[in-house]
């Protein structure tokens, strides 16, 4: 895996990134850090990437288990250290999984497997942060 991150220049603290799969992403800093607040912060990208990684796992596990999953949202709430390096110290993942006749045991298993075995991002994050998760099932 490879990506390239380039500073957009002296007028601020925005960066453009090109992923190995050819996608472009922009990041920016907060105004108090010289940014213009025009794009997500880099640490927000870490958090949202972790959310995407674990949601991907949950959906895939449920589909492979032949569950009729029709939606999956995950809301992440994180706390960071007060001093540098300001790593994540606590992250809570709340999953809202929608579908027809979803088994609670299947959803719980999918969330647990993601966090304990498959989601590289949340497993890395657990090296510095207390990770917790919850879920709800919505019948459609």
Image: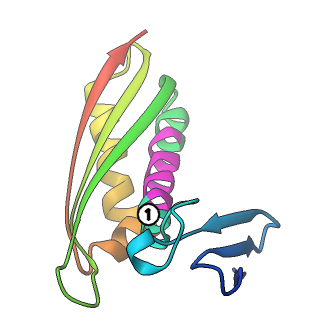
Q: Position of residue 105 (x, y in %)?
A: 26, 32
Q: Quadrant of residue 100?
A: top left
Magenta stretch bounds = 48-59
Secondary structure mostly seen in magenta is: helix
Which residue is depicted at the point 73% across and 72% down? 19
- Residue 112 lies left or right of residue 89; in this view the side is right
Residue 5 visible, this orientation: no
Please identify the residue farthest to the right as the structure is shown: 22
Residue 11 visible, this orientation: yes
- Residue 96 lies left or right of residue 15; in this view the side is left
Q: Nearer the viewer, residue 54 or 24?
A: 24
Q: Quadrant of residue 114?
A: bottom left
Count of labels in the image: 1
Q: Position of residue 131 (x, y in %)?
A: 21, 62
Query: Judging from the image, what secondary structure is the residue with disc 1 in?
Result: helix
Q: Is residue 12 above or below residue 22?
A: below
Which residue is depicted at the point 34% across and 17% down? 138
Residue under pointer 1: 44
The image's colour scheme reads rainbow
Membership of 52 in magenta stretch: yes
Which residue is depicted at the point 48% across and 42% down? 61
Q: Nearer the viewer, residue 56 or 91?
A: 91
Please identify the residue farthest to the front as the structure is shown: 11
């Amino acid at each position: 895996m490879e990506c390239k991150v380039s500073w957009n220049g002296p007028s601020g603290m925005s960066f453009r990134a090109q992923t190995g799969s050819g996608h472009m992403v922009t990041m920016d800093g907060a105004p108090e850090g010289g940014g213009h607040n025009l794009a997500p912060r880099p640490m927000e990208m870490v958090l949202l990437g972790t959310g995407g990684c674990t949601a991907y796992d949950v959906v895939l596990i449920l589909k492979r288990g032949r569950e009729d999953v029709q939606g999956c949202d995950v809301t992440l709430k994180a706390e960071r250290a007060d001093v540098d390096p300001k790593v994540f110290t606590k992250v809570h993942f709340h999953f809202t999984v929608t579908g027809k006749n979803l088994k609670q045991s299947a959803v719980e298993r999918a969330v647990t497997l993601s966090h304990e075995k498959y989601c590289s991002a949340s497993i890395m994050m657990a090296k510095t942060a207390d990770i917790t998760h919850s879920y709800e099932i919505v019948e459609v």
